[in-house]
Amino acid sequence: MRCMLRTLLSITTTLSLTCVIGAAAAPAVSPTLLGFDAAASSAQRALEARFDAQLKAADQREWLRTMSAAPTHVGSPQDLANAQTTLEQFRQWGWDARIETFDVLYPTPKSIAVELVAPTSFKARLNEPPIAGDAAFAQAHEMLPPYNIYGADGDVTAELVYVNYGMPDDYKELARHGVDVKGKIVIARYGHGWRGLKPKLAWQHGAVGCLIYSDPHEDGYFEGDVYPKGGWRPADGVQRGSVMDMVIHPGDPLTPGVGSTAKAKRLALKDAKTVLKIPVLPISYADAQPLLAALDGALAPASWRGALPITYHLGPGPAKVHLKVESNWQTRTLHNVIARVAGARAPEQWIVRGNHRDGWVFGADDPLAGHVAMMDEAKAIGGLLKQGWKPARTIVFASWDGEEPGLLGSTEWAETHADELRKHAVFYLNTDGNARGFFHAGGSHALQHFVNQVANDVTDPQTGVSVQQRVRARLQVEGFARGASAQAKKLAKLAASDADLPIEGLGSGSDFSTFLQHIGVAALDIGYGGEDQQDGVYHSAYDTFDHYERFGDPGFAYGIALAQTAGRIVLRAADAPVLPMRVGDFADTVDQYVGEVRKLADDERAHSVALGKLLDEDAFKLAADPKETSIAPPREDAVPFLAFAPLENALVQLKDSARAYDHALAALDPAKLDIKKRAQLNELLRGLERTLLDSKGLPGRPWYQHLVYAPGLYTGYGVKTLPCVREAIEERQWNQADRCIIATAKVLDAYAQRIDQARAALRK
């Protein structure tokens, strides 16, 4: 499901990357690893060299070729065969492995149709024809037609309205043009927000159906040559995907909050909150063009126009469309492969590593490129076991099923084992696909320094420098470019220093979500990409082995890099005498977030005042073209001054506690901590993330309990940091904002108190 990543360099100069790397002045690799002493660090790096020696690109290539040979959607023969292959391999490598099954709601299309019925006739193809020479299409008869899972059934005919990306601001712009989508079918292009929000917002505005198409401006011929000449989306390519309302909760729609085991009590379908209310289908830009060309009405704003050779109009009409979706609302069985290596000294502490296995069609890039790297890691760990090594902590590897429909496999497993995870899990490491390019990481910020150390120790296969040094070079080039944003310049300055590079906060879109945001397990999500052309075939039938080998990661060099990176994270976390967390990074990040929400409130206040002044002066009417419909925006209520004091007081205490702990940790020789004190310290660190949960959850969506990181109500994949406070301000719910400030301050206080306990354990 991984959201498409665009990490290409934005360079307006002719500087070569090699020159920039030479000037990057990246910090030297630290001889002592976080959580280790000097001697243990040396031994750990020797272990990692033995691990690296067992990784083989040829193995990854062969696994990917075999596993992506036929469609891998949930319930397909290939998906089950891949589960059995993964199970057998883990067992051969010395892991204690088994398959855990869950029965989930998994609708598939029975009948779908999109037809233009006025002012002319056109019937959409709604399939993806084979590409000559791509071997995967020998099994094309096994694939499902393009569809959006968890949309509603329906058979509707209505006028069409173009809504750009179909996000909240787009509906505000439509209102200014006097366009109402009530009773209409909307057509939105992919991008600028998670796909599931597009039909949800359309329904909230009264639409009766939704079409989502891939405009060539985003991932088609506007970006480069299309497949098979290049890697970008061909005219008939369709981006499938889930439209489950995952901002409410992921997982089986019928068993929210509990594992979908045989004993689970299931909701009736009509009561499932995450199944949408109107029919929705994804279509190609070949199918979208005749529909859009038939629209009249106001010209679309300049920023709404894509790359199709038409004039973009808003409608409504005269284009009228017939949309039909009829589904099989059946239950399917998921097959998660769970493998363990028991820890020798702290078996009660678990390091959990996962990547999903199911795809929308062949799934070579998403997810199998990441999955085969994880298999390579498991094979190499098995080799270390045969050499006599045993991890200090228990390692758990998970091959998830059902991620694409809505994080089904990981959510149902984690909800089933929630009590065990609260008791045992140290952190969860996630990957989801992989390709050639730059390293990226997101997650819990107490792990930021840990990730930076790992990135300094992995060599980029194309340049010979560390993967972190290459990211530093990219950030410096982007900040140097003419017209660079203030944020890009800030990151460029940071990249040129000895400071760690920041990791991103996590929203949703992959299997880390339940661990982090519902159970309170620290999490990381990592991968490589940005120089590939995989975005062009994202979630389509053209995400094949042949495409990946040509345009994703030729030679599988970044498959090895990913295995080296994830392997170091797992091995260091498994063996570190003291868990590798530096809490000052978390405190500094929260400081930034608090500043952002304060500024957000101030900006909202200034905006309301400025808007009122423009309305008083009749400026919108005077500025508009009298020949076009233009309606002034509504006046906004005054924005009060919020009571940020509890949050700011909590932040001061958090920073003081974190600074004191990190200072004590830096002076610590882990070898001198006796076993009992070390166990006490590690247990305090292991439970840090859980202090950031509020059992009441976020307003209107109690499944999400983390008050620092969550997917946004109107971002989906994208993270909302300090989500309770931030979204209350964005929604202009001022009383709720004050309540959220107090609730967030409480969890930060709890985090600080646990840090103080950890520092006390160090002193003792």
Image: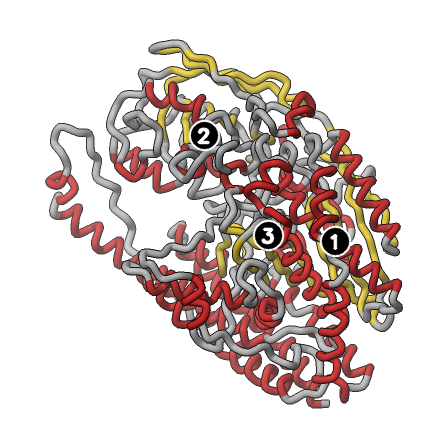
- Who's the residue at 47% across and 24% down the image? 209
Asked where in the image residue 47 lies, by quadrant, the reply is: bottom right
Left or right of 550? Residue 75 is: right
Left or right of 375? Residue 89 is: right
Question: What is the secondary structure assignment of the residue under circle 3?
Answer: loop
- Who's the residue at 66% across and 42% down the image? 403
Residue placed most toward the observer, 315 or 472 = 472
Distance between mark 3 and mark 1 Cα atoms? 33 Å
Pointer 1 residue: 376
Q: Are marks 2 and 1 in contact (CB under 8 Å)?
A: no
Report the disc number at residue 213: 2
* Amino acid type at image mark 2: Tyr
Residue placed most toward the observer, 215 or 762 = 215
* N-term-proximal mark, 2 vs 3: 2
Report the disc number at residue 704: 3
Give x and y (percent) for residue 735.
Answer: 42, 57
